[in-house]
Each structure stands twice: as C-alpha cells, then as structure tokens.
Amino acid sequence: MSVGLFNDKTNPPSEAQVLEAVGPKVHLWKQLLQVLRSQYRVIEDFKYLYGKRYGWALRFRVKSQLLVSLFPTQGGFVAQVNLGPEDIEQALALNPSDNIQKAIERANPYPEGRWLFISIETEEDLRDVQRLVEMRARSKRLV
C-alpha cells in the first residue's frame, strides 16, 4: 500500500484532482496550506517522492531544508514531518493526539531522527502537525 494516492510518476495530478481526492478533509488541507504560506517563507513544489510507495506530494521547503510534505490520499492526506532525536522527545512531551503518538511509534529511529507520516483526521491532528512543523523550523533555524 502506498502513502499517497497519486503514484504514477508519468502522470502528475492537477490541483483539482488533488482537492477532489482529499475530499472531506479539504478544509484541513486548506488550513494547513494557509498556515505554511503565511508563517514561513516557503518554496513549494509538487514532486514525485521516494518512488511508487509514496507518490506525488506537495513539498514545502525553507531555504534548502524540507519543512513538510503533504501526500494526498483518498478522502484525506498524510503529512510527512522529519524530526531529530531531541525533537521526538519534545514532541512526546507535548501530549499529542493518539494519531501523532502512533506515528512516532511506527517511525523507524535513525541517528538523525525519524520520518513521521501522519494521517490528518481531525483539527487536533492538524494543530499537532503545526506544532511539529514549528519544532522542525526552530531546530533547523528556519524561522
């Protein structure tokens, strides 16, 4: 099973296709886009990431550092946030939603941290992802 819905490298989806796929979670998608665009000096691109298992994602960078990637799914979306080991401890101390805690537990630990893939289901998930993005931005000195 792939992380994102659109996994044909030769066929990037249109914005309309993305919004249609995200469907009932489109309000959360738009809220997150608005926050990222207003709070950070992001460079956006829609890119085919990591092969068929992941697919097309809307990627947000500040300077040359990845801030977050958003993978459209059928009826929602997944946010990828990469956190260093010290950030993982801080994230758990925030008492995040169950969804975020499960994403942290699922993520393989590496010396440089963990890649969290978080399905945004609720306003609480959205708020927690915004806090994780803020953590990443501070730890990478992107703000």
Image: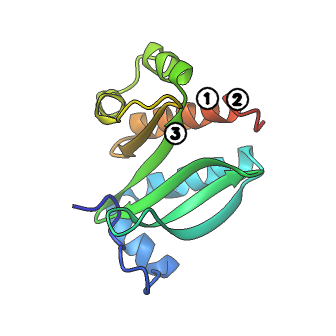
> Against 118, is 108 above or below?
above
Estimate the x, y position of residue 71 in percent, counting from the top left.
43, 60
Viewer-closest of 31 and 50: 50
Please identify the quadrant where the C terminus is shown.
top right
Of mark 1 and mark 3, the one earlier in the sequence is 3
The amino acid type of the residue labelled 1 equals Met
User: Which residue in the structure is indicated by mark 2?
Assistant: 138
**Amino acid on which the number 2 mark rests in the picture:** Arg
Q: Is residue 67 left or right of residue 69?
A: right
Determine which of the numbered discs, if any, sits on residue 59 in the image: none
The earlier-in-sequence mark between 2 and 3 is: 3
Tag 1, which secondary structure?
A: helix
Is the residue 138 above or below the residue 50 in the image? above
- Residue name at image x 50 percent, y 42 percent: 81
- Res 47 quadrant in image: bottom right
Near-viewer residue (17 or 90): 90
Q: Depth check: give the residue in front, 94 or 52.
A: 52
Q: Position of residue 76 (x, y in %)?
A: 34, 58
What crowding class fits label 3: few (fewer than 14 Cα within 10 Å), some (14-19), or many (20 or more)?
A: many
In the rendered view, does 43 fall on the left or right side of 14?
A: right
Alpha-carbon span between mark 1 and mark 3: 10 Å
At 32% across and 58% down in the image, what residue appears? 3
Asked if disc 2 and disc 1 are in contact, CB closer than 8 Å, the reply is yes
Give the distance between the C-alpha atoms of the residues marked 2 and 3, in whole angstroms: 13 Å
Q: CA distance from mark 2 to mark 1?
A: 5 Å
Identify the residue at horizontal 38%, vertical 46% (top origin).
Answer: 120
Give percent across and percent down for residue 28: 45, 51
